[in-house]
Amino acid sequence: MKKYCLLLSCFGAVFNVIAMENTPEELVSLKEKINRAIIKVEQTQRKLWSYKISRYEDEEGDISSSIEQHSPHSNERWLLKQINGQLPTEKQINNFAKKKQKQSNKVTKEGDIKLTLRELINQESLSLVSIDEKHIVMAFNVSWEKLGKDSRGKLQGKLTYQKEQQFIEKIAIWNNADFSPMFTANITDLAVTFTFININGAVLAKQNEMKMKGSFAYFTDINETSLDTFSDYLYQGQ
């Protein structure tokens, strides 16, 4: 079911959210903080950074892993460095390069296909969950079009805002009811977590995690876990 894991290429646990009471003025101020934090992500030019991605995937017990390197000014921007704990063969490197080129061509033709925080977070629905010296936690409604129309109203979200550096540190999304992202597919449990880091004002992905259970074509179980970890960021802008 790798088509579902691709949803995380753009960038947890289940929580019970109880919104706190706050005045309209306070809520407006909090929403403005979140909007400015989203703008920080939008203004970060990730393509100008070199970084490493360590990927792990478990599909119904079929486990795979890889390490990829992104280098913005190299002739080959993406390089497969490791696959399933081994050095890749020339064939695997070539197949990887073709896949990345195909993805790049699709973006050029259709525009940016990655999910954005502005699309994911319904800012009008933001409500305060908790606040302390270091963090603000807010709940929001989720509308994730790639998960299909049936997912509407069945997904909840929560974000953690880091007050000192003024950025969104974590986003958690989960379902509150079964839903069907496509014909004959039924998702019973979905938990997605995005975490971010702030490097000199640039907000970059730190880790993307997805856990999903359900069924496909009525008889095939879906039991997937995927984890992408980003590291070794180095700004390569001119």
Image (cartoon, grey):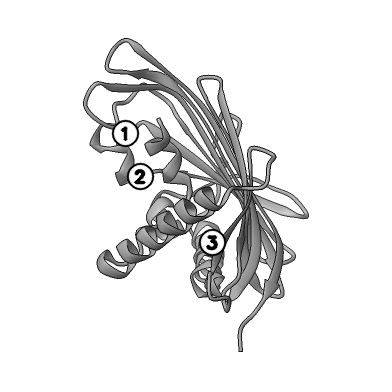
Query: How far across and how far down the image is residue 74, in percent?
Result: 58, 76
For label 1, the SS is: helix
- At 67% from the left and 47% from the top, the residue drawn is 87
Q: Residues within 10 Å of mark 3 (few under 14, many from 20)?
A: many
For label 3, the SS is: helix
Query: How far across and how far down the image is residue 22, in percent?
Result: 55, 49
Residue farthest to the top, as pictured: 219
Judging depth in this view, the residue of 192 and 38 nearest the camera is: 192
Residue farthest to the front, as pictured: 90
Label 2 vs label 3: CA separation?
19 Å
Tell me: residue 150, above or below residue 31: above
Tell me the kind of residue under disc 2.
Trp
Q: Residues within 10 Å of mark 2 (few under 14, many from 20)?
A: some
* Residue 116 shows up from this direction: no
- At 70% from the left and 66% from the top, the residue drawn is 233
Q: Quadrant of the N terminus?
A: top left
Task: Please report whichever mark, 1 or 3, sits nearer to the chain's N-terminal start.
Answer: 3
